[in-house]
């Protein structure tokens, strides 16, 4: 199969000397990049093998040239910007110890992995309340009735360890949902979010690209997961089923990275015999969202289900668990082929921004009417009078992240320009409250 390495994708490099002396983090590097089939045959049977339509009959080779400019330097190379198990735990600790965000988060360990690591699960909702706020003019006596029980949305990610974009998008989702914006308060007041940020902690910790320690692709085990061999999938599926018995579970999104296609896009589940055009609405809204439209391509979305995908998360959740709005969100390893980021690599902040845009689109989907949104916001703010008044009462449509502009570009891969990413004096993609530089301006500047 072809690879984005043949279409401009560069590896990322980290120089310890550059980090110590100049504050430079991970950068896009490499020239003379080629990805091609080699003469060594690949004999794989079963899910993921050549006969499944997913695999290949041969192994592949990646070659590239790197210039090391600093004598005595220690250099790290990676497929994409790393996001480790330690990064995951550190981020959770920050959310759970923050005075503002911890009010809305409940953390527990879903299960232990084969190596004994935690598979974490988060429950996010406004002040831990399970009922919708009383609408203006409503009867508070009905506040605990079943019809006012909040609906549930599930997010999962990082089932494939090498797809670090999933964790960066998940970070954007978690930061948005636990934030202080009016949009975040509305979402927490409308829904209970169940989130498993890392479905394959073992694979991440031990450096696998796609498999777990049991040697299988966990995203092909959803139909009949083993409690002993695939515990994270077994217990996540059980959690969805348990939650569905309590309340309506209205959406499921599994976060991934894609090594062959540009842009960010979705896979959904339609049925040729019984078409479900409704499953296309949410992805279309993501492509229209003021944040999502910078990265998301509806044209790249697909809603057909191949036989080889019938045991994946989105298909099993849609068909077996009965949640039609079940999606795989895919983010490119490379960049965009449209818009202001065309011919530029995406970086960490772009993926986090995409996560924020995904959350903001939920409001476009479930509260499309501006008056309805304002009315519900009034009820939410009345129920939470201690909120920061500086955030204002307005609800900008599709204004994820409080209306902040998007992250900047990260390297023109067509020209193989070097771009800086990560902590340092020229840190990329970290918009501040005073950031007024638009994405396209940074891209044109080649930064």
Image: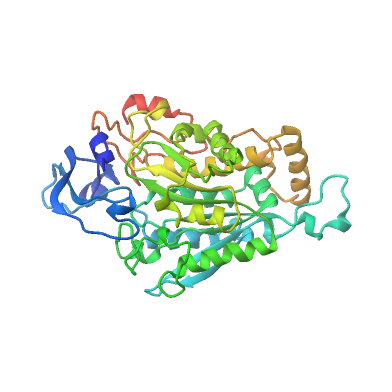
Q: Position of residue 107 (x, y in %)?
A: 56, 66
Q: Could you say which is closer to the camera, residue 329 or residue 57?
A: 57
Residue 167 in view in this figure: no
Q: Which image quarter is the N terminus in? A: top left
Question: Looking at the image, which residue is at 54% across and 44% down?
Answer: 271
Query: Percent x, y for residue 436?
Result: 48, 29
Residue nearest the viewer, comparing 170 with 297: 297
Q: Residue extending furthest front?
A: 273
- Tell which of 260 and 101 is nearer to you: 260
Task: Establish if 107 lies above or below 387.
Answer: below
In the drawing, does residue 154 fall left or right of residue 3? right
Picture quadrant where residue 424 is located: top left
Q: Is residue 366 left or right of residue 376?
A: left
Residue 80 seen from this side: yes
- Quadrant in which the C terminus is drawn: top left
Q: Is residue 356 above or below residue 92?
A: above
- Residue 420 in picture, x, y percent from top left: 30, 39
Q: Is residue 254 left or right of residue 414?
A: right
Q: Is residue 431 above or below residue 189?
A: above
Residue for point 27% across, 33% down? 413
Instruction: Residue at 71% x, 37% y: name it.
Output: 393
């Amino acid at each position: 199969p072809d690879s984005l390495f043949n279409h401009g994708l560069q590896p990322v490099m980290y120089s310890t000397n550059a980090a110590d002396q100049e504050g430079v983090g991970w950068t896009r590097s490499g020239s003379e990049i080629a990805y091609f089939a080699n003469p060594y045959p690949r004999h794989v049977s079963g899910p993921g093998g050549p006969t499944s339509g997913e695999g290949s009959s041969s192994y592949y080779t990646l070659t590239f040239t790197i210039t090391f400019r600093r004598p005595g330097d220690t250099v790290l190379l990676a497929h994409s910007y790393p996001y480790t198990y330690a990064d995951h735990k550190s981020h959770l600790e920050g959310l759970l110890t923050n005075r503002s965000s911890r009010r809305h988060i409940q953390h527990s360990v879903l299960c232990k992995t084969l190596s004994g690591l935690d598979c974490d699960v988060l429950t996010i909702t406004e002040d831990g309340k399970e009922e919708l706020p009383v609408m203006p003019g409503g009867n508070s006596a009905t506040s605990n009735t079943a019809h006012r029980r909040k609906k549930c949305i599930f997010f999962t990610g990082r089932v494939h360890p090498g797809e670090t974009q999933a964790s960066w998008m998940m970070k954007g989702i978690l930061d948005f949902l636990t934030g202080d914006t009016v949009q975040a308060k509305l979402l927490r007041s409308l829904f209970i979010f169940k989130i498993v940020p890392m479905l394959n902690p073992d694979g991440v910790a031990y450096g696998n690209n796609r498999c777990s320690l049991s040697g299988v692709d966990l995203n092909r085990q959803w139909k009949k997961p083993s409690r002993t061999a695939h515990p994270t999938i077994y217990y996540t599926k059980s959690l969805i089923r348990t939650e569905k018995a309590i309340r309506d579970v209205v959406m499921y999104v599994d976060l991934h990275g894609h090594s062959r296609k540009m842009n960010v896009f979705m896979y959904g589940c339609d049925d040729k015999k019984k078409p479900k055009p409704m499953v296309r609405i949410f992805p279309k809204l993501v492509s229209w969202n003021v944040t999502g439209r910078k990265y998301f391509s509806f044209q790249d979305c697909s809603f057909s289900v191949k036989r080889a995908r019938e045991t994946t998360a989105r298909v099993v959740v849609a068909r077996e668990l009965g949640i039609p709005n079940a999606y795989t969100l895919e983010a490119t390893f490379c960049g965009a082929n449209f818009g202001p980021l065309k011919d530029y690599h995406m970086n960490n902040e772009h993926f986090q921004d995409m996560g924020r845009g995904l959350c903001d689109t939920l409001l476009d989907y479930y509260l499309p009417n501006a008056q309805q949104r304002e009315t519900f916001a009034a009820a939410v703010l009345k129920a939470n009078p201690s909120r920061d008044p500086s955030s204002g009462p307005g609800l900008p449509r599709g204004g994820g992240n409080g209306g902040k502009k998007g992250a900047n570009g990260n390297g023109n891969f067509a020209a193989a320009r070097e771009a800086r990413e990560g902590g340092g004096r020229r840190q990329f993609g970290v918009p501040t409250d005073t950031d007024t530089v638009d994405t396209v301006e940074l891209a044109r500047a080649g930064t």
